[in-house]
Image (cartoon, helix red, strand yellow):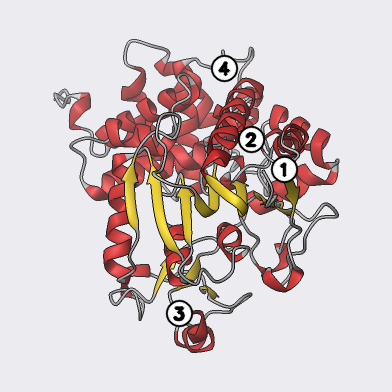
Amino acid sequence: MANSSRPEDVPGLPARRAALRLLHAVLRRGDPLELALHGVAQGLAPADRALVHAIAAETLRHLPDLDALIDSATRQPLPHDAKARMVLRIALIQVLALGTAPHAAIATALPLVDGGPRKLVHGVFGTLTRANPTLRSPPTLPPDVASRWAGQWGDAMPQAAAEAYAQRPPIDLSLRDSGQTARWAEELCGRSFAPGHVRLPEGANIPDLPGFTEGAWWVQDLAASIPARLLGRGEGRHILDLCAAPGGKTMQLAAAGWRVTAVDQSKKRLERLGENLARTGISAEVVQADLRTWAPDSPADAILLDAPCTATGIYRRHPDVLHRIGPRQIAELAELQTELLARSIAWLKPGGTLIYATCSLEQAEGEERIAQFLSAHPDFTPCPADPADLPEGIAPTAQGWVRTLPDTLADRGGTDGFFIARLARSIKP
């Protein structure tokens, strides 16, 4: 008797359709993965939503190696954006990285190419899986990214970046009370690299950990905690935390005695900031505004500008950035950073401190931006970071900046990629 089931009846197919749409959004339109996920996963159960994310994220993490496997099994290379190639990527990553049985992976893959080259997909998939392939470890970086980073940081950097890419990023916590560091490191079975910091053991389930409900700490990468560390104790002074959401630096600053005005354009991200403030019992003034049109009522003692950037420094957590970001996006964001720097310094008192930070591995968004800024603003001078203020294993550069790269703390789990500069404004106008 003929099988009368429709493709839509195949268990797990809606999640694979969503994963296909998600990859198209990232690779064709350049949408951020997390943002696009919200749209494509509407109506899916939480477990299926998590599967969609896992399929897409692991496909992006291993994209060059998946394509090399596919090309090894076809007479002529498939177009880079062909649906057959995309479906094969999805089917293969489930088998090679997510533990899906081959028969289940192909059963949910073939309906995705209805009206297309089903025989080709089936044949290539079968040829490859019968050969028991494995993915390269560490994964191969996209060639244009590897070339760009080698040009900026030297030939060893892409290999270090690939090795970091292969590791699960650690989870760091910032503590509300840095005086309790030893206690929380012991209670959470973690290790600390700086006052107010704990790095958790792998596999920790955040909401179930001691201290979460009472707001004793929040999740924040170690490198991301450095900008606020460089400002020290606030003693009631006023600081503008610009591009503040989701609020890790806001909470650090307020906990250190600063009177914080936290400004961000994103309503959704500010909602998270508000939730974090409520959970920790920390207070700050929160403002939703576009920095290009907003201005404070009076100048502040300090400014922390965590500028919008390409976020290539968090590629381990967000592999889509390696496929969405190129020279055009870097140049556009560097222009915005220049604009925000020039605009925000009007809000800083004479003698005040400016911290500029980006979670980027691009010199155009870090070293080059600050060099250009200092050339245009002689009333600002570098205020080199004191090694005593930095986490264990992280040192200032020769210029006094802080720059974390893929090999920073590599033997202890690494950090996100960051650039941080501390500048002092002259007391005299």
Mark 4–mark 3 CB contact (< 8 Å) = no
Residue 318: % across, % down:
51, 43
Q: Nearer the viewer, mark 3 or mark 2?
A: 3
Residue 112: % across, % down:
34, 23
Alpha-carbon neighbours of circle 4 within 10 Å: few (<14), some, or many (≥20)?
A: few
Q: CA distance from mark 1 to mark 4?
A: 51 Å
Q: Nearer the viewer, mark 4 or mark 3?
A: 3
Disc with the residue nearer the chain's start (3 vs 2)? 2
Relative to the observer, which residue lies in front, 390 or 235? 235
Disc with the residue nearer the chain's start (1 vs 4)? 4
What residue lies at 32% left-to-right and 61% top-to-bottom? 276
Alpha-carbon neighbours of circle 3 within 10 Å: few (<14), some, or many (≥20)?
A: some
Circle 1 residue: 379
Residue 130: % across, % down:
55, 38
What residue lies at 42% left-to-right and 40% top-to-bottom? 55
Q: Which of the 4 image quarters holds residue 307?
A: top right
Alpha-carbon neighbours of circle 1 within 10 Å: few (<14), some, or many (≥20)?
A: some
Q: Mark 2 falls on what kind of element? A: helix
Asked whether the viewer can see residue 134, the reply is no
